[in-house]
Image (cartoon, coloured by chain):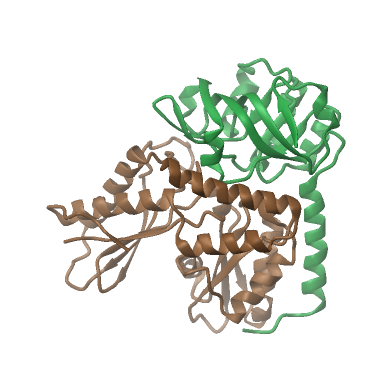
Chain colours: A brown, B green
Amino acid sequence: MMANPADSTLSGSLADATEMALTEASIRLPPDVLAVLTRAAAAERDEIARSELATILENIALAEERQVPICQDTGVPVVYITLPPDIPLTPELFDGVREGVRRATAAVPLRPNVVDPITRRNTGDNTGVGMPAVHVTPGERLAVTVLPKGAGSENASRIGMLLPSQAGDIPKFVAETMLIAGGRPCPPVILGVGIGGTFDAVAALAKEALLLPVDTMDDYEQAICDAVNALGIGPMGLGGDTTALAVKVKRADCHTASLPVAVNVQCWACRRATVEVRR
Amino acid sequence: MIDLTTPLGDEVLDLRAGDRVTLTGTIYTARDEAHMRMMEEGIPFDPEGAVVYHCGPVVQEGRLVVAGPTTSARMNALTGFLIDAGVSAIIGKGGMGREVVEDLRGRAVYLAFTGGCAALAAARMTLRGVYFEDLGMAEAVWIIEADHLPLTVGIDAHGGDIFSAVHEKAKTQFHQRFNIHQDNVP
């Protein structure tokens, strides 16, 4: 976690922190993501897949060297704020985040991706109605975590309201998501899986799962990851051993009559960064 | 590795799915909106032997910052007119539908560029101009000079399609694994 320079107002500090986090996330991949990519490149046996993974690693190095975004789809800003007990949840906090998004869009620069859903008119600065998506949770420190989310992978995401008797079908549902997606979400992917909760909460869990470190998996996550990799979709859908770099699961309890499952597909560029807000 | 230079000619007909190539010369970006505009108003560049790149770059002060490929499948239903007009290659990611495989037959190829590799792409590209700038940064048709862009032939001019071959194998794997036995409850 980085710390940002002090600003006179809390809103201004949040803007600074948001801009800093978006800049960092867009240009540099987190160490855990880089580690699993490097590991996959070393283990891959397919010739085309090996060259795709080598190109990805070269691209990551070039983005850092040139201080430019890793991918031109710099995503839509998904923002998580942890709020300590002494700070009230006010509209100014949201204003600060919006301002940080605007600044990062102009400065990095980020591609303006936010549009009206029907007219498709672009707002020009990556903010809009309900954008950035901001999620607030209680925490010890005031910190901003960003997860810029590209559309290629987001579009391949799925939600299913399974039956309570279908808990054993969850790995199948996840693998099926990638079977349908093929090369479109830019594999090798990281799959955030939400299990339980409600229709809305399970999608949020799936996205939050993408914030977890990807360089470790429990046995359940590993088994799903192995099932996905057995499909042989490979990097960019061109075939190979490496379809998923990791599967991460977050759970919540749910109604006795339902089993919500959500898969949030994330391309290999699992961009995230956290900046603590100075105050 | 086969080196291709624009405008392309019959050499693309010799390519086979899975071949690694590099591409040097002029390419034109186009996404959903640009395809729809070109269908209405005509193609603003000479399409004969041209290369269309499914890409919405980040451009700042007349300079390409990053320019990786976008998901080609969105343009499945919007591609036939380009091939009819003489376009010889499409660059994108993720592959295209069966109708495009047929459109390409005997005429053109689909070249896969590694998704997300936008910094690497920009390092091998120079911005030359733009059409339809009113469509916005992501959707405009940008004229780009490419220098040895590394690509894989995804769909050749003979119906060869890596993506569908990989998909068929994945489907078989999926059915074998999940329809025969159920995984244990966590």
Q: Is residue B96 left or right of residue A158?
A: right
The part of the image, by quadrant, that contains residue B25 is: top right
User: Looking at the image, which residue is at 51% across and 24% down?
Assistant: B127
The part of the image, by quadrant, that contains residue A158 is: bottom right
Question: Viewer-proximal residue, A278 or A63?
Answer: A63
User: Looking at the image, which residue is at 62% across and 43% down?
Assistant: B71
Q: Visible in this render: residue A131?
A: no
Residue A52 image offset from top left, x and y in percent: 66, 49
Report the number of discs. Answer: 0
Quadrant in the picture for the C terminus of chain A: bottom left
Residue A16 image offset from top left, x and y in percent: 25, 51
Residue A106 image offset from top left, x and y in percent: 33, 37
Q: Is residue A200 above or below residue A72?
A: below
Q: Visible in this render: residue A200?
A: yes
Toward the left, the furthest residue is A8
Residue A113 image offset from top left, x and y in percent: 45, 41
User: Looking at the image, which residue is at 53% across and 63% down?
Assistant: A35
Question: Viewer-proximal residue, A30 or A172?
Answer: A30
Q: Is residue A148 left or right of residue B10?
A: left
Q: Is residue A216 above or below residue A268?
A: below
Quadrant in the picture for the N terminus of chain A: bottom left
